[in-house]
Image: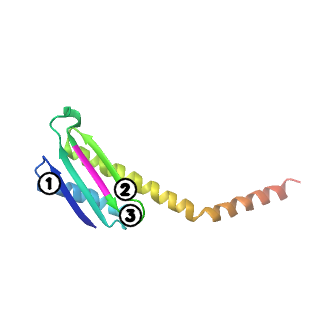
Amino acid sequence: MKLILSTHNVTLTKTLEDRVVKKLEQLEHFDHRAVDARVTLEHDHRRIPERQFRCAMQLAMRGPDLFAEARESDLYAAIDVVAKKIEQQIRKRHSKHKAHKHKDAARLKNARRQGALQTAEP
């Protein structure tokens, strides 16, 4: 996966870059089809201290892209929150795909159950 990491009013340290790469590797475990990831790290000194740091992440993949952002008092916490949000989106996308793929099988299974119940009643 290609990583595009940009910062605004934040000096990019090795630990910040390692944290982002680590979180992306964890996300790649859930869905390996992501083409590239765009991560933006910002510091806005005009905001209240609880929301000074912003992390935004966009994962480009087949179908609609995934996007999440978070504002926290700590940049590392913002990265963690964004990774969790993207993970939830990947899980939701996977379960929707799985439900759609197995829709006919579930319908057939329910029809068999109903048929078995109707023959057992009289």
Asked if residue 33 lies left or right of residue 118, the reply is: left
Q: Amino acid at mark 1?
A: Thr
Q: Residue at x 20, y 58 (%)?
A: 5
Judged from this view, the residue extending furthest toward the top is: 48
- Disc assigned to residue 15: 1
Q: Which element is circle 3 on?
A: loop
Q: Which mark is residue 2?
A: none
| Residue annotated with mark 3 | 31
Picture layout, residue 69 above or below residue 113: above
Q: Residue at x 41, y 60 (%)?
A: 64
Magenta segment: 54-58
Near-viewer residue (102 or 57): 57
Whether pointer 2 and pointer 1 mark residues with C-beta atoms closer than 8 Å, the reply is: no
Say whether disc 2 or disc 1 marks the residue closer to the N-terminus.
1
Location of residue 29 by image quarter = bottom left
Judge depth for marks 2 and 1 and give the one in front.
2
Question: Which quadrant: the N terminus?
Answer: bottom left
Q: Report how far apart the C-alphas of labels 2 and 1 lie in the structure.
A: 25 Å
Give the mark nearest the N terminus, 3 or 2.
3
Magenta span has 19? no
Q: CA distance from mark 3 to mark 1?
A: 24 Å
Using the image as rendered, state which of residue 82 and residue 5 is in the foreground: 5
Provide the residue designation for mark 2: 66
How far across and down, in percent of the image, does residue 89 sit?
Answer: 41, 53
What amino acid is at disc 2? Leu
- Tell me how far mark 3 sits from mark 2, CA to CA: 12 Å
Q: Amino acid at mark 3?
A: Asp
Counting other residues with Cα less than 10 Å from the Cα at mark 3, is it few (<14), some (14-19), or many (20 or more)? some
Q: Quadrant of the C terminus?
A: bottom right
